Image (tube, rainbow, N blue to C red):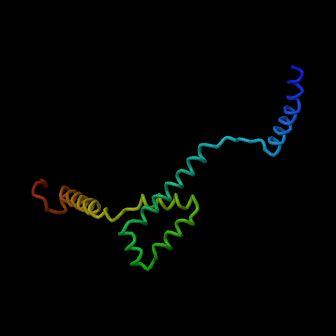
Amino acid sequence: MKRFRQILKPVGFFLAIFVFMMSGPCQSVVAAMIGTEAVIDSDRAHNAREYLKTFLARDDVKTALVSQGIDPLEAQNRIDSLTDEEARRVADQLDQMPAGGGFFATLLIVVFLVFVILLVTDITGYTDIFPFVKSK
């Protein structure tokens, strides 16, 4: 047993120095909490950029850009250079803009308003347009 300790003592000393040398250059890790808003904001910015990229990949958008003299690659580079806040704002504005589909709804509203105005004037006796309105 004494002989065994004499052999293991230098090996143990060498291993202790080796472990000390290996742990010396390592820095301690400082962890901090990441706020939920920071994670959500980065995800929103990523989603906005992906939405804008898929929007620019459409053929009708490319033809519209070319017809206005804008190179689609230049538009892509400009989207890549946007800040996170700008990308979110542009994506939100694109979602909220009408895409030319509001004409029929506007026409129906105008026709309804003209009908109501004529009905009121017919009831009050200023016009005689509708036969189902009984005037005094």
In the rendering, at what x and y percent does residue 109 appear?
A: 27, 59
In the rendering, at what x and y percent does residue 28 appear?
A: 77, 41
Classify residue 51 by image quadrant. Answer: bottom left
> Measuring 10% from the left and 54% from the top, which residue is drawn there?
132
Instruction: Determine whether, in the image, residue 108 is placed left or right of residue 77.
Output: left
Quadrant containing the N terminus in the rendered view: top right
Instruction: Determine whether, in the image, residue 32 is placed left or right of residue 92.
Output: right
Instruction: Determine whether, in the image, residue 77 is placed left or right of residue 96.
Output: right
Quadrant containing the C terminus in the rendered view: bottom left
User: Of residues 38 and 107, which is closer to you in this image?
Assistant: 38
- Outermost residue on the top side: it is 1
- Outermost residue on the bottom side: it is 69
Relative vertical location of residue 20 with respect to residue 52 in this rendering, above or below = above
Relative vertical location of residue 67 with respect to residue 18 in this rendering, above or below = below
In the rendering, at what x and y percent does residue 86 appear?
A: 55, 61
Relative vertical location of residue 12 with respect to residue 126 in this rendering, above or below = above
Classify residue 104 by image quadrant. Answer: bottom left
Relative vertical location of residue 101 with respect to residue 74 in this rendering, above or below = above
In the rendering, at what x and y percent does residue 121 appear?
A: 21, 60
